[in-house]
Image: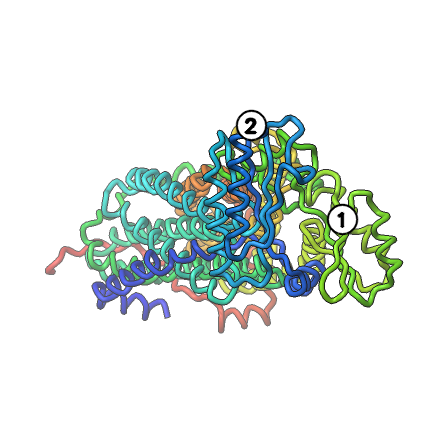
Amino acid sequence: MLSALARAATRRPLTVMLLWGLFLLLGFGLGTGVFARLSDNVPEVPGTESQSAAEYLERADPAGESISGVVAGTAVADPELRAEVGRAVADVRAVEGVAAVPDPYTTRGLTAEDGRALIIPVTLKGGLDDDAQERTLDAAADRLREIDAPDVHVSGGPLLGQQLGERAQEDVKFAEIVSLPVVLALLLVVFGGLRSALMPLVIAISGIAGAFLALFAFSEVTDISVYAIQVTTMLGLGLAVDYALLMLMRFKEERRHTEDVVEAVHRTVGAAGRTVLFSGLTVAVSLTGLLVFPSVFLRSMGLAVAAVVVIDMLAALTLLPALLARFGGRIAPAKERPEGEEGRFFARLARFAARRRIAVLAVAVPVLLVLAFPLAGMKIAIGDARQLPTDTEARQLHDTVIEHFPPGTGVTPVTVVVRPSADPAATDALRALSPNTAVRELPGGATVLQIQPPGEADGDEATGLVERVREVRGDEAVEVTGPAARLVDFRDMLAERAPWAAVTVLAGIFVLLFAFTGSVLLPLRTVATTLLSLAAALGVVVWVFQDGHLAGLLGAEGLGALSLTAPPLIVAIAFGLAMDYELFILARMREARQRTGDDGEAVVDGLRRSGRVVTCAALLLAIVFAAFMTGGFSPILQIGLGLTLAVLIDATVVQMLLVPATMSLLGRHAWWAPAPLRKVHDRFGLSEEPEEAPRPRVPSGV
């Protein structure tokens, strides 16, 4: 298959480039339409109680979504401001699709005790279609913003999703502006030529276009989270550079052996291309674990990110060979180095780790475990506007409410739906749980209790309240929804499905690594070291963003919990990326072992010849992830930091120290497999011919 791809790409390179050019136009044209379709309904899990209750309310409740406007920065009792607010309230009430707008001056709790702020809640009618709701939201929000006051902020409900989508688009643009020039500069240093440096960026841009197009396609059938844009774009950009870097460095090596550019491309695809293929499949398999969860968010993220990985892989295996066939003759071959000089630093590092394998393990493993220690106290939460940068309207509204109103103002209550068939005594028992309970009747006989929790909407008190409601109701037809209930159900879903997700991913990874190496021990060793580095990275994320240590340096603050989006995405993506570098090194070790038959020297030679590309790839990927941390959105900061640390820890501590140490400890047994599995591998696994000895370059025309 790879040979066929290489032949097709080199036979008609202009056709391949034209097809990818059309793909880019689609991605940056049609694909960018996904920004208007982003959703912030991350914690929804179909089939859960909280989702069932929410769907019931959507059908039965005549009131729909709501937004809020906050006016502050001056004395709200000022007659002119009061008159202007009155006119605005009247105008918003007249907007088609608006159900209710209370007078903030006569409604209890809507005017701050210090007289410096007021809240204007706007409730929309239920049953509005998407277009009608958007028109209503825009008209109501625009009119509220026209109020002449120092501070006027409007957000909440579906408007918050719109604002997050706009922020996501801005953050992606800024990250690309920051990362691409830095990546280009480093590629210029690595390759020493503009043509070589530009090719990975072409593949990276293809990956970004693929990210947009894949997300747009998935938005036709499912909700796409606001987090998807940054995550898929950062991964698409980073992996594209990784794969192109591996292919280009191998091409420059092959150019030392032959004048024929097309032959060099074929040899590159036959060797490095196999590694890219297995690497892409491994990352994609790592993401299939997300498909085990019933969460729409996790499933859509798994599908979208896996699609982007496949697009990057295809671009590296088709577009890059076409570019090399067309322009590769102008790329200088890798410089000839005296025997033993190439990769000398990495060879010394490998020999050191192999000789001092027990000491390396005795130091590195405890250090990683110490970094992982905060993971034991990890908490997850849906979060509130504090996750947003301080310059966003939703965050400014939140901060204004916190500054001027009592604690709990604006906090979404725990919503209890008592169906008509429930015993009336159940309603009385539930009302007794808290004095801060509002009751209203729905058409059809159902009763809604809105219990105001102390603290945050998804804090420990709120989730504890959800659990008490579920204990008190017994077998009655009572359901709980709201942020706290969604969080409880999301946690339960993770706990129930996580073991199945782990089994799915580990089984897939084991099969792929066995097909690549022919060993049953190497997959086990790889999974163990990868989980260790991943736990260390996630432990640091907990220490920073949950506990608040050094969070200010990243423009964030300790929130007492991680975003519920961060841990599953960090685990799935970082696990795949770790496999990426593992395959880069194992491929070279395998080549050296086939060539020399010396297990010890294969470890040294494998790291000697792959250490540079792994280090450069990790550095470039870390820069890409770091660029996406400039937006200030806490969940993306958490994901960005987790992935950056996972990549750097894996590329340094694991690949440069633990891999040679454990390979040396295992010796020839590292490549062992039972005879029946050996036969299976010989028939179906990856088979490469031993690398040919370097051949003298033949002058053209001879």
Residue 497 pos. (x, y %) = 68, 60
Q: Residue furthest left?
A: 701
In the rendered structure, which amino acid carries the disc numbered 2? Asp
Q: Quadrant of residue 508?
A: bottom right
In the rendered structure, which amino acid carries the disc numbered 1? Ala
Q: Residue at x 86, y 60 (%)?
A: 424
Quarter of the picture containing the N terminus is: bottom left
| Left or right: 359, with 622 as reference point | right
- Element type at mark 1: strand
Residue 317 visible here: yes
Q: Residue at x 28, y 50 (%)?
A: 199
Residue matched to label 1: 438
Residue 656 pos. (x, y %) = 50, 41
Q: Earlier in the sequence, mark 2 or mark 1?
A: 2
- Element type at mark 2: loop
Residue 257 pos. (x, y %) = 25, 54
Number of the label disc, if any, that sits on residue 86: none
Residue matched to label 2: 78
